[in-house]
Image: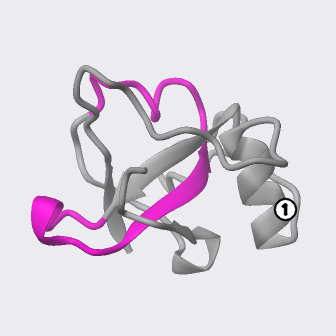
Amino acid sequence: MKVKNLKWGPSGPRPLPKGYKSWLDYWIKNYGGVATGCANKDCENKAAVGGHVMPPDGKRSNHWFIIPLCEGCNSPSNRHEFEVAQRHLVGISNQLS
């Protein structure tokens, strides 16, 4: 499935839900597995963070996800679409609270 990084405004990303140490911890606990490699199919780096992504349709999307990503693939400068296995997507609410 093609995805792209979410672009955050001046307020930054949403707050981490209670009970989690990081977004990668959120992914691990909700996926039920271990994050080893970056979920980008074209990357061979180690997963370092839980990255916020959405389908390429952008603002029309009602589906936001967390996936394990390396620092480079999670960079705000990475505005390109990339391919991930759909099974790695862990859904999150698209409503900022």
Tag 1 residue: 29
Rendered position, 50 above or below 30: above
Q: Residue furthest bottom?
A: 87
Query: Is 42 on the left or on the right of 24, as rendered?
Result: left
- Give the image's coloring scheme: one colour
Q: Amino acid at mark 1?
A: Lys
The spot of residue 81 in percent (x, y) is 25, 52
Residue 91 falls in image quadrant: bottom right
Query: Is 64 on the left or on the right of 16, as rendered?
Result: left
Q: Which span is picked out in magenta? A: 55-78
The spot of residue 54 in percent (x, y) is 33, 61
29 magenta-colored = no
User: What is the tally of numbered marks visible in this picture?
Assistant: 1
Residue sitting nearer the eye, 25 or 3: 25
Residue 33 falls in image quadrant: bottom right
What residue sits 76% from the left and 47% below the top?
Answer: 18
The spot of residue 80 in percent (x, y) is 23, 43
Rendered position, 77 above or below 7: above
The spot of residue 28 in percent (x, y) is 81, 57
What residue sits 43% from the left and 34% below the top?
Answer: 13
Within 10 angstroms of label 1, few (less than 14), some, or many (20 or more) residues? few
**How would you classify the magenta stretch by its main secondary structure?**
loop
61 magenta-colored = yes
